[in-house]
Amino acid sequence: MKDIPFEKTSVEDITNTTWQELPPSKSLDKIWETHRFPKYESKPDIKLLMPWVQQLPPELRPRQLVIQYARIAHKLAELWKHPLACEKYFNELMIDNRGDRQGFPAEVALELAALQAYFTTNVLVQHYSVWGDRIG
C-alpha cells in the first residue's frame, strides 16, 4: 500500500488559505412566506358561522373563539362534518408539537376543550364499527 503524500503546514496557514478560497456565502435565511398559509385580507365573516354555532348546545357555543379567532372557528365549522380531519385539527390546536407556542387565552382554551369533548363524545363516536375499528 502506498503512503499518502502530505506536507506539513501550520494551522494559521490553513485557516488563512481556506477562508480566502471559499466563495462568498449565500444567505441562509429561508423564505418562510412560501411555506406559510396565505394571509387573510380581512377577518372572516362571523355571520357565516351562525348556522354551525346555533346547532351546538347553548352552553357550548364558542363566543370568545368566534370573536378572537374567527379563522379557527371557520376551519372547525368546515371540518365538523369530516370527523377524522376535525379530530386531527383539534389535536393540532390543543397539543403544541413545536414547543414555542404561547397558547390560547384561558376563555378560548376552555371553549376549545369543551368543543373537543363534545365532538369526541357526540360526533366522533358515530364513526366506529362495533369492534372498535374506525370507519372512514
Image (cartoon, helix red, strand yellow):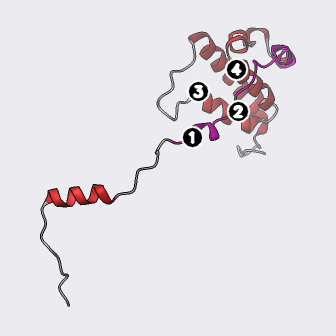
| Residue placed most toward the observer, 17 or 123 | 17
Marks 1 and 3 sit apart, C-alpha to C-alpha, by 27 Å
- Examine the structure image and report whether residue 117 is included in the region drawn in magenta: no
Q: Are marks 4 and 3 in contact (CB under 8 Å)?
A: no
x and y, in percent, of residue 96 in the image:
53, 30
Q: Nearer the viewer, mark 1 or mark 2?
A: 1
Tag 1 or tag 4, which sits nearer the N-term?
1
Of the residues tagged 2 and 3, which is closer to the observer? Answer: 2
User: What amino acid does circle 2 point to?
Assistant: Pro
Which numbered circle lies on residue 94? 3
Q: Quadrant of residue 89?
A: top right
Q: Which mark is residue 67?
A: none
- Residue 51 falls inside the magenta stretch: yes
Q: Secondary structure at mark 3?
A: helix
What's the residue type where badge 1 is placed?
Ile
Give the amino acid type for the residue marked by disc 3 in the picture.
Met
Question: Which segment is the magenta one?
Answer: 30-54
Pointer 4: what residue? 115
Dot 4 falls on a residue whose secondary structure is helix
Q: Which residue is mark 1?
A: 31
Residue type at numbered disc 4: Leu
Which mark is drawn over residue 38? 2
Q: CA distance from mark 4 to mark 1?
A: 36 Å
